[in-house]
């Protein structure tokens, strides 16, 4: 059993690519604690299939920038988009140095695939398990670092803070139920998305937006909490639990969407929100619970080499993609809103950072372009680590102790009840923001008349 110390230099909540890459870029002389609710592989990063974007060459910059902005309905933060694209080659180089095995052409150069919303192939990949490949390699390196401690089954219940800054977190050990109040000079929230609050989602059920609720509770700025992306194609099932994603790159390589009469009804390579809307429209027209995805237009050899995981999962569910179409349906997939952070990961509370899907730096706008998520998470996590190192200073011990002593420990006595209240807090905030946006839209339409 691992006994947690009372103080760490940096505490990171989450073991996806954002949390791990942040940890790896903190200088080795700093003690880093990385925690997660369950086992480290229970992150959406691990599930990512399609790939990770990379600027192939300078001549593609304008096109890549426009594709990202168009997908985001031009609500993106231009500074964040530029930083992401300009930093994409460095991110891929870092990953290769960590041992990530990307697909290659015969001449040894990186192979690229194309997904919906992209005007050209620019996505690096490892079969259809890119997220697992990246996450596992980062985890291997992180575990080899003497200054990094990764502890599973630790749930964050709150942050330790006052009106001035963050001093650490309150956690519960899922194995023995023990409560810990941990100090940290810097705290990084990298706890992923909010799919666990929805009935149908590609996310792990444990991802319920706890960090988001905690920030709402303490008045830390949260942006666009209702910007929730639906993935157009997840394998239709009546079983309960997480929905299996059929990667965007399947359509990028030639798969087509068909209605109940097996007729093609849309352009499969439009941005996700548009394809989702077309699928829902067709389902309503047909009176069905799903549409069909036909992978047979893709050469068999390519399907075998590029999508082995999808092929096997479909076989397990009784579908042979080489002989028949598979039923697909839209499901909640990604969260574009989140805890407000700048392009260095800093939130509106000093000493508190947020990176990855749990944050909102505006890079995705209203709708994420396919395969920008891993890139965004890795890049801004590294920038957060660099910002922490450059500006490093220890917490004021007296203020930290005062903030800890001000905690109401009774609030954490029933962690299940507390987490349930956090989940409801997130749902309520989404509902309120939807109402506010609808009212604002109605007002704008009225003014136009």
Image (cartoon, helix red, strand yellow):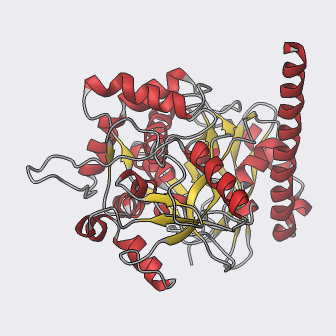
Quadrant of the snapshot with the C terminus: top right
Residue nearest the observer in this picture, 117 or 169: 117
Direction from residue 169 to residue 30 in the image, left or right: left
User: Which image quadrant for residue 152?
Assistant: bottom right
Question: Residue 283, how many percent across, how many down?
Answer: 68, 60
Visible in this render: residue 259? Answer: yes
User: Which image quadrant for residue 327?
Assistant: bottom right
Q: Is residue 291 above or below residue 213?
A: below
Visible in this render: residue 188? Answer: no
Identify the residue shown where x is 59% and y is 28%.
342
How many marks can you see?
A: 0
Residue nearest the observer in this picture, 445 or 122: 445
Identify the residue shown where x is 37% and y is 22%.
62
Identify the residue shown where x is 71% and y is 57%.
285
Question: Residue 397, how many percent across, how many down?
Answer: 69, 40
Residue nearest the observer in this picture, 81 or 393: 81
Question: Residue 11, how many percent across, how many down?
Answer: 58, 51
Identify the residue shown where x is 82% and y is 36%.
219
Question: Residue 54, how many percent across, how many down?
Answer: 33, 39
Quadrant of the snapshot with the N terminus: bottom right
Direction from residue 27 to residue 368 in the image, left or right: right
Q: Is residue 15 above or below residue 336?
A: below
Q: Going by the picture, which residue comes out furthest to the left?
A: 107
Direction from residue 99 to residue 180 in the image, left or right: right
């Amino acid at each position: 059993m691992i006994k947690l110390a009372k103080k760490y230099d940096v505490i990171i909540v989450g073991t996806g690519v954002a949390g791990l890459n942040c940890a790896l870029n903190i200088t080795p002389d700093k003690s880093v604690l990385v925690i997660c609710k369950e086992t480290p592989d229970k992150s959406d990063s691990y599930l990512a299939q399609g790939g990770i974007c990379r600027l192939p060459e300078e001549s593609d910059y304008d096109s890549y920038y426009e594709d990202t902005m168009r997908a985001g309905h031009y609500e993106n933060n231009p500074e964040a988009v530029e930083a992401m694209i300009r930093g994409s080659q460095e991110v891929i180089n870092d990953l290769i140095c960590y041992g990530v095995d990307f697909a290659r052409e015969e001449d040894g150069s990186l192979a690229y695939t194309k997904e919906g919303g992209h005007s050209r192939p620019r996505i690096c990949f490892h079969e259809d398990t890119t997220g697992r490949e990246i996450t596992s390699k980062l985890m291997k390196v992180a575990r080899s670092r003497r200054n990094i401690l990764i502890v599973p089954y630790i749930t964050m219940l709150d942050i330790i803070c006052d009106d001035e800054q963050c001093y650490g977190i309150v956690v519960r050990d899922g194995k023995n139920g023990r409560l810990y109040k941990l100090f940290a000079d810097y705290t990084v929230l990298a706890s992923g998305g909010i799919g666990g609050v929805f009935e149908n989602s590609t996310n792990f059920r444990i991802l319920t937006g706890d960090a988001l609720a905690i920030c709402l509770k303490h008045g830390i700025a949260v942006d666009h909490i209702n910007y929730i992306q639906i993935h157009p194609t997840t394998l239709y099932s009546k079983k309960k639990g997480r929905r299996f994603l059929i990667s965007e790159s399947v359509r990028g390589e030639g798969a087509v969407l068909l209605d109940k009469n097996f007729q093609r009804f849309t352009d499969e390579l439009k941005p996700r929100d548009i394809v989702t809307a077309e699928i829902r429209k067709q389902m309503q027209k047909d009176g069905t619970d799903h549409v069909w995805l036909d992978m047979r237009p893709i050469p068999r050899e390519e399907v075998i080499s590029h999508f082995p995981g999808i092929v096997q999962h479909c076989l397990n569910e009784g579908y042979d993609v080489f002989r028949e179409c598979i039923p697909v349906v839209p499901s909640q997939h990604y969260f574009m809103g989140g805890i407000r952070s700048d392009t260095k990961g800093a939130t509106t509370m000093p000493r508190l950072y947020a990176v990855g899907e749990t944050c909102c730096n505006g890079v995705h706008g209203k709708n994420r372009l396919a395969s920008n998520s891993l890139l965004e998470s890795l890049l801004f996590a590294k920038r957060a680590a660099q910002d922490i190192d450059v500006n490093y200073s220890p917490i004021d011990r007296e203020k930290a102790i005062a903030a800890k002593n001000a905690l109401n420990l009774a609030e954490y006595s029933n962690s299940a009840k507390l987490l349930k209240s956090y989940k409801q807090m997130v749902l309520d905030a989404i509902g309120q923001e939807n109402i506010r946006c609808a009212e604002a839209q109605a007002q704008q339409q009225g003014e136009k008349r």
